[in-house]
Image: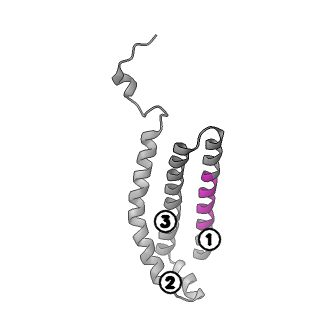
């Protein structure tokens, strides 16, 4: 039998061994979105109201296309992490696992479709 002190039991990443990493991932994506969302609004706003050809030409440039793609990727990753926390808090058992898998597939799928659409426009 191992004799562990309270301090030894408390050290580490928590009972699930992933809480701290998840917390920091949410914080990092939040800070990234603080930078990306205004950039996206300004780049998208300047293209808003243009003709089809003007929009294609605008998003063919690297900066607007990269900002839009990064905003989609980081936004959906942040969405996935947030929804996972909500599901873990309010859904239990097999339903929890199924809901997390479905939401992960949905968020990564939507991000992939968005990035593909931007790549099609940019290239």
Main secondary structure type of the part rendered in magenta: helix
Q: Is residue 37 above or below residue 13?
A: below
Q: Earlier in the sequence, mark 3 or mark 1?
A: 3
- Checking the image for residue 23, the label placed there is none
Q: Which residue is mark 2?
A: 48
Question: Of the residues tagged 2 and 1, which is closer to the observer?
Answer: 2
How busy is the neighbourhood of tag 1: few (under 14 within 10 Å), some, or many (20 plus)?
few
Q: Dot 1 lies on which element?
A: helix
Residue farthest along the top direction in this orientation? 1
Q: Residues within 10 Å of mark 2 (few under 14, many from 20)?
A: few
The image quadrant of residue 93 is: top right
Residue that label 3 marks: 71
**Image location (x, y in percent) of residue 13:** 42, 34
**Residue 14, image x, y percentages:** 43, 33
Q: Quadrant of residue 113?
A: bottom right
Q: Residue 21: give x, y in percent of width and height.
A: 44, 42
Residue sitting at 45 percent across and 40 percent down? Answer: 19
Residue 16 magenta-highlighted = no
Q: Which mark is residue 117?
A: 1
> Mark 2 or 3 closer to N-term?
2
Q: Residue furthest front?
A: 90
């Amino acid at each position: 039998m191992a004799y562990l002190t309270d301090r030894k039991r408390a050290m580490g990443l928590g009972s699930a061994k992933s809480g701290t990493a998840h917390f920091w991932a949410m914080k990092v994506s939040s800070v990234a979105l603080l930078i990306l969302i205004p950039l996206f609004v300004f780049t998208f706003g300047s293209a808003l109201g243009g003709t089809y050809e003007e929009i294609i030409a605008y998003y063919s440039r690297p900066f607007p296309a990269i900002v839009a793609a990064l905003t989609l990727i980081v936004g959906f990753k942040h969405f996935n992490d947030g929804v996972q926390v909500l599901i873990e808090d309010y859904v239990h058992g097999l339903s929890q696992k199924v809901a997390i898998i479905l939401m992960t597939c949905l968020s990564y799928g939507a991000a992939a479709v968005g990035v593909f659409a931007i790549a099609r426009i940019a290239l």
